Image (cartoon, helix red, strand yellow):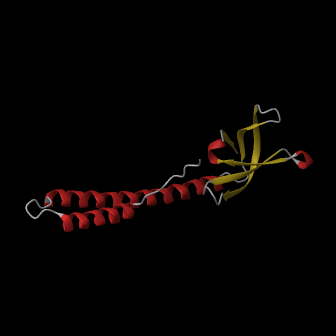
Amino acid sequence: MAVSAVTVSASDIQMDYMKILVAQLQNQNPLEPLDNNEMASQLAQLSQLGQIELLNSSFSAVMANTQRSYANSLIDRNVTFFAEDVTGALEKLTGRVDSVFNDTNTKECLLGVTVGEGDLSQEYTLGLDAVVLVES
């Protein structure tokens, strides 16, 4: 059975909280009303959660732009990385970065690298984290 990850945004949490709060207010005991300080504290925490989510989104966008800029700076440079050979053993390879592109599924910044020249050349696609050395 496959398990999928569920992402819940701050606005979803706020909407759920507001529904619960309205239900509590409608069904509360008039002799024991809800504590105003507790409600205010919970609303403040929800507001902070929304601000943190917004900050996280902004930071993610900045990191993506930084990675893209770094990847672009590698074009026409030699990079060293490890790849599996036909036996499954890791071998160290060095090749020239020809292109930079984004994987549309993962949004990861990838490098197109050519190892060797002419008919013996091979094309590799690697993530920035696979690069272990950069040369001029």
Coordinates of residue 38 in the picture (x, y in percent): 17, 56
Kindly give the residue lying farthest to the right in the view shown. 119
Taking depth in this image into account, of 13 and 125 the one nearest to the observer is: 13
Residue drawn 77% across the image and 44% down it: 95
Residue drawn 70% across the image and 39% down it: 81
Kindly give the residue lying farthest to the left in the view shown. 31
Coordinates of residue 57 in the picture (x, y in percent): 45, 60
Would you say 10 lies left or right of 45 here? right
What is the total number of numbered labels drawn onto the structure image?
A: 0
Taking depth in this image into account, of 124 and 44 the one nearest to the observer is: 44
Coordinates of residue 30 in the picture (x, y in percent): 10, 65
Taking depth in this image into account, of 45 and 134 the one nearest to the observer is: 45
Residue drawn 40% across the image and 61% down it: 54
Would you say 65 lies left or right of 12 here? right
Question: Which quarter of the figure has residue 109?
Answer: bottom right
Question: Which quarter of the figure has residue 58?
Answer: bottom left
Name above or below for residue 115 compared with residue 106: above
Would you say 81 lies left or right of 7 here? right
Taking depth in this image into account, of 56 and 46 the one nearest to the observer is: 46
Would you say 96 lies left or right of 21 here? right
Coordinates of residue 13 in the picture (x, y in percent): 36, 60
Name above or below for residue 76 compared with residue 30: above
Image quarter (top left, top right, bottom left or bottom right) of the C terminus: top right
